[in-house]
Structures are given as structure tokens and as C-alpha cells.
Amino acid sequence: MFEKIMIVLQVFFGLVGLYQLVLSFFGWYRKKESKSHSPQKTFAVIVAAHNEEEVIGALLENLQKMRYPREMYDIFVICDNCTDNTVAITNSFEGVTACVRNNPDKRGKGYALEWMLDKLWKMPKSYDAVVVFDADNLVDVDFLQYMNDDLCNGKQVIQGYLDTKNPNDSWISASNAINYWFCNRLWQLPRYNLGLSNFLGGTGMCFESKLLKEMGWGATSLVEDLEFTVRCIQRNVYPKINFDARVYDEKPLTFKASARQRLRWMQGHFEVTRKYMFPLLKQGIKERSLTKIDAALYVFNSYNFLIGFLLTIIYYINYMLPTDLNLISIYGYLPLWVSIPFSIYGIMQCPLAMYLEKVPWKTYLRLVFYPIFLISWWPITFWAFFTQNNKQWSHTKHTRVVRLEEVQSKQG
């Protein structure tokens, strides 16, 4: 019986992997964006900050230099449970509003955004859309113009392109950057090209105000971006990515900081999977909606990682130690003309994504360490499964102070 279950699991996860592999082929090209519009939309630009005194100044300088009419956007910084000089630095910038929040019982960006939006709707001035950034970000100066274009074209939720401002600081920051380039090019772009839903990435997000007021934020898990994405898809609102609207995010420098961040993500991912996956899958099947079925599979990735890890361990133990189990790997029965090309393509996906994204060649050297980063996802996911009820938010400290011009010059 156990042997049959293992075969069924192999077939299922093989099909899921094949689906994602085939999907990635549609990321080899980019569809042209729709025509641009003159500035029409007004924006409330919200920056989520918790003890960000070292980096908040660079972002606020950046945001004040956006190539968009200054009277058409206002900047608000959520100084969330700050105990450093974040509030003072924010107040030193003319035209920037520091919104101080103190609630140690409800920590995390999800709660902070819910609080800020409630505050925003009560202000005398109204805005067409809300844009959200993290305090460690840098932003392309045309970002708001791109959001304006998408909103004018009827989009309600838009995700900017998440890039990295410090890819060469360490092997960990480089591995994170490679992971983002891969996801942008071979996960997000194929879905955009095929008319499926894209997924929010936590920062560089734009929301139509009318939609936010109707839905409410309501996303307070450790992965508020994924949770809100799913809530949108359930309402037939499909977020889209804008590849030209670049946001440069700071990646952790050490393995410990990265592991802690990824553990938090996976804990939240398991919660969202448990809460939304089956209802979304059921809805997709009932409505014959490939978009919703695809989204359900995307949400399932936490269990995909977990069960893939367990299957690997079981087969490794069975191979190394004598047991009474008769476990076979069905992948060993695939003809070479199938298994070899797909294996090669699977290995080459990351360098291919980097090539398509025109990443500087010296960054390719960091690919040597990337397999270590990938393998580390397995124990992190395993531990996250058993600690998924731990909803305590943990802060990732940001210290990398660079300016937008430096980042763009290094990218060539």
C-alpha cells in the first residue's frame, strides 16, 4: 500500500513540475505594454517602516524625485512601533507625513497597512490609488507613471518588477537576487503573457482605492501579499505585473538573516494554503477557470516543497539502507530522449532567466553557490510546517544605504 502511495505522489508531483516547466517557455518573450497616458491618477504613496533609520532617508529622497507631477502624489510613512530615529528622519523631509503607530500586540506589515488605510480613508483628501513600498527600497523614477498607465487601462491591482539593490554584497544576497530574476522571468512573466493572474510581492504594489475600500485590506498573515492576491482572484480581480516599473529591494547579507526571513514567509504560506487553496481550487473547477486553478497550484507550493523534501529523504534512506520496502522511482523509467532534455532545461532555467533579464556577467559566478541556497529551502520549509501556528512577525534589519543612480549604473 505504501509503495502505491509513493508512486501516486511521484506521478502527481511530476505533473505539477511538468506544468511549471512548460509554463516557463512562455517567459522567453515579452508582450508589449499598452499605450501610455498623460498623468491622470492621484496616489497615496505609503512606506512601511519599522526601525529603518539607516535606509529610510535614501528612499524618501528617491520618492521626492519621481517623474510625476508632485501635486498628484503624497508620501506617508507608517512608523510602526519604532524605537529609533525613523520618525525624526521622516519629519525632516518636507512634504512627507509620518504616521506613528504603536501596537506591540499586532505587529507586522499586514496590521500596519490595515491601520494606515483606515486612517487614509478618513482624511479630507482622496486618492485614486494607493502604492506601497518597504523602507529599504529604491524606486524607478517613472514608477508612478507606469502605474498611472495601467490604472487608465483598467487594471485595479498592479505589481512592479522586484529587482535587487545589493546583489553582489554576499553569496546570500546574490542567491536571493537570482531567485527573484528567475521568478520574475519564468514564473510571473509567463502568467502575464498567457493572461493568468500575477502575484503580489510585498512591495512595489499599487491598488485602486475604490477596490481597497470595497474589499478592505483584511490580509494580516505573515504573507499579506499572497493572502491579498488570493482574495483578489476569488473576486475575479487579477493582479498584473509591470516589468518596466522597477523596485530595488535590499536582500539579507547572511544565511541566518535569510533563513529567518524565509522561515517567516513559509510559515505564512502554510497558513494561506490551509485557508484558501481548496476553496480556490473548487471555485476554479466549478467555473472552469484556468486562472483560479493555476493560482491554487501556486498557493500549493508550500506543500510542494515540503512533500518533495520528504520524498527525497525517504528514497535516499531506502537506497542507502536495507529495508523491506519495494520503492521504485518512476522517473528512472522515462526514456532518455525525454528525461535528458528536461533535466538540462531544469538546470539551465536560472542562467537562462539571468540572460533574458540582461544581468551583468560577473553575477553568473554566483551561480556556484545557488544550489546551496536552493537546498536550504527544504529544512526551512520542514521547520515552517511544524511552526506554522507561530504568527509572530520578525523584523529583517536593513543597513545597505545606496542611491538609485548607483544601482542603475552597476546594472549598465
Image: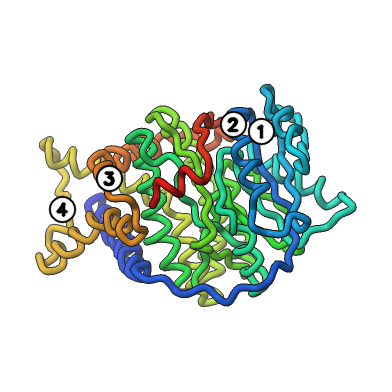
CA distance separating discs 2 and 3: 38 Å
Q: Which residue is mark 4?
A: 328
Q: Which residue is mark 3?
A: 362
User: Is disc 3 placed on a helix, strand or loop?
Assistant: helix
Total number of numbered labels? 4
User: Is disc 1 placed on a helix, strand or loop?
Assistant: loop
User: Is disc 4 placed on a helix, strand or loop?
Assistant: loop
Q: Position of residue 314 (x, y in %)?
A: 23, 42
Q: Earlier in the sequence, mark 4 or mark 3?
A: 4
**Which residue is rendered at x = 66% and y = 33% of the image?**
107
Say if mark 3 contacts mark 1, CB within 8 Å.
no
Q: Position of residue 134 (x, y in %)?
A: 60, 42
Say if mark 2 contacts mark 1, CB within 8 Å.
yes
Q: Earlier in the sequence, mark 4 or mark 2?
A: 4
CA distance separating discs 4 and 2: 41 Å
Checking the image for residue 392, the label placed there is: 2
CA distance separating discs 2 and 1: 8 Å
> Which residue is farthest top?
83
Say what amino acid the circle numbered 1 marks.
Arg
CA distance separating discs 3 and 1: 39 Å
Of the two numbered discs 4 and 2 in the rendering, the one whose residue sits closer to the viewer: 2
Res 323 visible: yes
**Which residue is rendered at x = 72% and y = 34% of the image?**
90
Say if mark 4 contacts mark 2, CB within 8 Å.
no
**Which residue is rendered at x = 53% and y = 51% of the image?**
247
Q: Which residue is mark 1?
A: 107
User: Is disc 2 placed on a helix, strand or loop?
Assistant: loop
Binning the other alpha carbons within 10 Å of mark 3 as few (below 14), some (14 to 19) or many (20 upward) gives: few
Say what amino acid the circle numbered 4 marks.
Ile
Checking the image for residue 174, the label placed there is: none
Residue 256 relative to residue 337: left or right: right
Q: Position of residue 202 (x, y in %)?
A: 56, 48
